[in-house]
Image (tube, grey):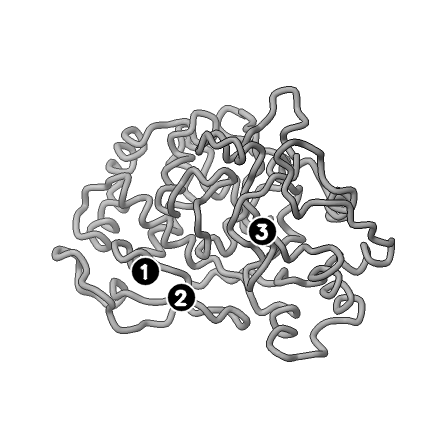
Amino acid sequence: MRRLGLLCVVLLMALAACEPAQQQPARQAATADNAPIQPKLPAGIDAPPPIPADNPLTTAKIELGRQLFFDPRLSADGIVSCATCHNPVMGFTDGRPTSMGVKGQIGGRSAPSVINLAYATNGVFWDGRAKSLEDQAKGPIANPIEMGTTHEAMVANLNGISGYKEQFQRVFGSPEITIDNVARAIASFERTIISGNSPWDKFQKGDAGALSDSAKRGWDIYQKKANCIACHAGFNLTDNNYHNLGVGLDKAEPDLGRYVITKMEEDKGRFKTPTLREITYTGPYMHDGRFRTLEEVIEFYNKGGIKNAQLDKEVKALNLTATEKADLLPS
């Protein structure tokens, strides 16, 4: 599994313009940076991310979203921004087992990476409670532990900042800031955080020399004996589905994951499969950040997870040798 798309976060601010796919709102400024575009993709990523018809990407909107993403004024204390928990230096996570929000409060789950979240389907967040990146962008703002404010208070605060009012006028055709347009801008920025062009991508494109012999053995183990590919599949190394590994169910107060959203018995303990892109930067691992290293993660799977009534059928003891475990590790 060496270098399985792990090397290069690309903040695609140099974007290639294309013909408008649809009309912009009538009052929006008719400028080049408000023309709908597609992000320039790194090598190895062939398919553009899906973009909602009601929120086309534009250069101006992406820039507005970038500013909002890094602005702590979206939070109650003026300290916590989206980037507090999704730091580019840490693979757009925060390096903590579980995240810290306003007033030093600690949440119950690890901050998932934003990398390649543009390709997320079937829900966003560990439990899939948000249907889209736009829905996801609204959640932390009103979460009492994370950013600790309300949508109304955050919007009122931004409406008092003249620079933002000018930008919202430019991007959305009105200086009046709304939670929906804040979410649209942040989601647009997040759709440009795309990783690719790794040795594994090159290997997949036919460059046999892109991976070492150990990495090639690891890729074979990944697909066959270890069966990682059952869940970490495709170019983004995730099936975008939910699985029960037993993680979280072994606590005094179990985290029931997807079940909290669906109330379906089979969803108890299921959490969404994260991408493995940039995985060397996104630890600690699992939704509760219990594993500091990838060696610990591999050993967890090698032992077959944590037994429970809803354990995923693909999770079973692997009986990997020490060499096989080493070959699965990135280098």
Q: Amino acid at mark 3?
A: Gly
x and y percentages locating residue 322 in the rendered image: 87, 53
Say left or right for 145 vs 318. Answer: left
Q: Classify the position of the C terminus by image quarter.
A: bottom right
Q: Residue furthest right?
A: 322
Amino acid carrying mark 1 in the image: Leu
Label 1 CA crowd tier, 10 Å (few <14, some 14–19, many 20+):
many
The image quadrant of residue 149 is top left
Distance (Cα) linking label 3 and label 2: 20 Å
The residue under label 1 is: 57
Q: Earlier in the sequence, mark 1 or mark 3?
A: 1
Label for residue 39?
Answer: 2
Residue 201 sits above or below residue 55 on the image = below
Mark 1: secondary structure: loop
Find numbered disc 3 in the image and state the secondary structure of the residue it sits on: loop
Dot 2 lies on which element?
loop
Q: How many marks?
A: 3
Q: Residues within 10 Å of mark 3 (few under 14, many from 20)?
A: many
Residue 200 picture location, percent across and down = 65, 68
Nearer the observer, 227 or 106: 227
Q: CA distance from mark 2 to mark 1?
A: 8 Å
Closer to the chain start, of discs 3 and 2, is 2
Q: Position of residue 294 (x, y in %)?
A: 73, 48
Label pair 2/1, CB-CB below 8 angstroms:
yes
